Image: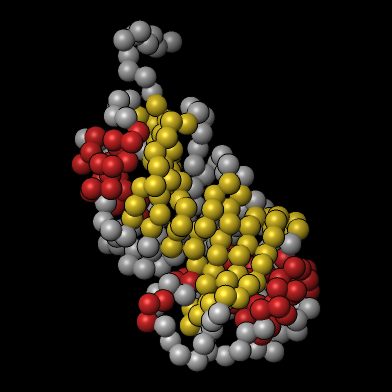
Amino acid sequence: MQCVSADSPKVRNLKFTIQYDGKTLHGWQIQKNAVTVQELFQNALFSVIGETPDIKGCSRTDSGVHANMYCISMKTVHPIPCERLRLALNRYLPKTIVVLSVEEADVDFHARYSSLGKEYVYKVWNSKTRNPFLEGYALHYRYEIDEKMLNNSAQAFVGKHDFTSFCTLDNREKGDFVREIKYFKVERDGDLVTFTVAADGFLYNMVRIMVGTLLKIQQGKLDKDSIPKILEEKNRKSAGPTAPAHGLYLNKVFY
């Protein structure tokens, strides 16, 4: 057994809450030949504390996806106060990423595995005219959207289901495809239509495929009551297309 000296520095477990604009970024996870949130965050950490601890992100967001709330956990023995660390990181991070808070967490807290669920928002600019200020931040959909009809159709997602039909199968997804949707809302504010969904967890591209399926219902290419049948078929080909990444936001992480 390894002995620990009474003078050994205390191991701290820190929880970071950040926001980021994913328009020019290639998601969270470090990749070769692509700039990611994790890489930029680790570079900023090294500039501030002179080390690059193992950091854990709450989700694997894809290229072009944004985050209103994204959580990171990190263990370190560095004594820097939380608020000082937050301010220093924001000096070194690009303007597309900001640290909202840094706080001490329980030693067993893990940004991903301690999460009880997440909420995503998908934004659609529903107008015949493009909005230049939403380019890269909302899907431009020029045809009519009946948000009330789509909201009714989306209620079939709510509850515990096998979402094999609503995910992209790759090496990320193995085994259990059952997830529990807590709520799904389709709402309009002027020309902006938002799809808001919360669940205990999400599969790869799940939200974007659900939105793509609802838009296919809007187009009349799928029946408005077709979602239960698509879920039952457990076949990706039965669902609609994957909506573009730039309309998607990780909105909340529940702990």
The image shows residue 66, relative to residue 236, as above or below, that is above
- The spot of residue 49 in percent (x, y) is 24, 34
Q: Residue at x 69, y 60 (%)?
A: 183
The image shows residue 174, relative to residue 239, as above or below, that is above
- Quarter of the view holding residue 157: bottom right
Q: Residue at x 46, y 57 (%)?
A: 68
In this rendering, would 170 be left or right of 13? right
The image shows residue 31, relative to residue 153, as above or below, that is above
- Quarter of the view holding residue 1: top left
* Colouring style: secondary structure
Viewer-proximal residue among 129 and 184: 129
Q: Residue at x 32, y 30 (%)?
A: 81
In this rendering, would 173 be left or right of 98? right
Q: Residue at x 67, y 83 (%)?
A: 146
| Whether residue 240 can be seen here | no
In this rendering, would 236 be left or right of 242? right
- The spot of residue 115 in percent (x, y) is 57, 44
Q: Count numbered badges in the picture.
A: 0
- The spot of residue 79 in percent (x, y) is 30, 25
| Whether residue 176 can be seen here | yes
| Quarter of the image where the C terminus is located | top right
- The spot of residue 197 in percent (x, y) is 63, 62
- Quarter of the view holding residue 179: bottom right
Q: Residue furthest front?
A: 190
